[in-house]
Amino acid sequence: MAKSPAPAPNDTPVDSTALGSGKGRATPSRAEQEAARKRPLVPDTKEAKARARAELAAQREKARIGMAAGEERYLPVRDRGPQRRFARDFVDAGWHLGEGVMPFMVLVIVATLIPVQFFQYWSFVALWIFILFVIGDMIITSVRVKRAAKEKFGESRLEKGLGWYAAMRTVQMRFMRLPKAQVKRGQYPA
């Protein structure tokens, strides 16, 4: 009689749960199951509202900081894009008369408090002359920004309203601009 060959040893590990000897954990008691399912009939809305309010405040603060820093995803639609960034940097690099409108108006208000007709009249005249110069500066800045953007991005790709966007930024005081100025004065974009 011929001997049959011995079966080869199996090298794969044997899983004890696969053999059908149980599920690997104890069955929870009825009290444990009921405790796991138990929740209040009325949820604690005061705590949930406070937590939601705190999370919303944290998100808003993060968005505010991101917008001030000029991060693209936090900017409103009107401020997004490379051409808008270019216009902002161009305006922020220069000095503009429009930054002085608010302080000048405060001086005019103070001058109107002086009960002398001469000061009141000429302060208003000076204000209107200053505003005319500011409008001239806005027009010049708008033309310069559009010309520089055409050179950099090409005339066919120039966004509509870029000059107006730059002109309106010149009227804001530098420390109040949003997004905040990312360049120093004199540091014009290339």
Image (spheres, rainbow, N blue to C red):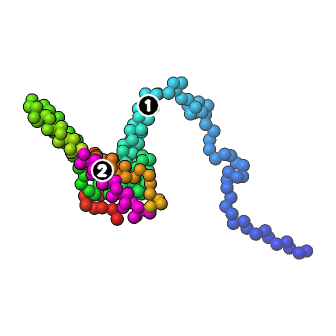
94 or 41, nearer to the observer:
94
Find out whether residue 6 is within the magenta segment.
no
Element at badge 1? helix
> Is residue 103 something that shows in the picture?
no
> Is residue 138 something that shows in the picture?
yes
Name the residue beneath numbered marker 2: 138
Where's residue 183, x and y in %? 29, 58
* Amino acid at pointer 1: Lys
Looking at marks 1 and 2 on the same chain, the residue that comes earlier in the sequence is marked by 1
Residue appearing at x 37%, y 49% in the figure: 164
Q: Which residues are magenta?
A: 132-154
Query: Which is closer to the viewer, label 1 or label 2?
Result: 2
Q: Is residue 147 left or right of residue 24?
A: left
Find out whether residue 140 is within the magenta segment.
yes
Where's residue 74, x and y in %? 41, 48
> Which quadrant of the structure image shows residue 159?
bottom left
Vertical side of 30 occupied by 17: above or below:
below
Q: Is residue 10 left or right of residue 108?
A: right
* Amino acid at pointer 2: Met
Name the residue beneath numbered marker 1: 49
Residue appearing at x 44%, y 52% in the figure: 160
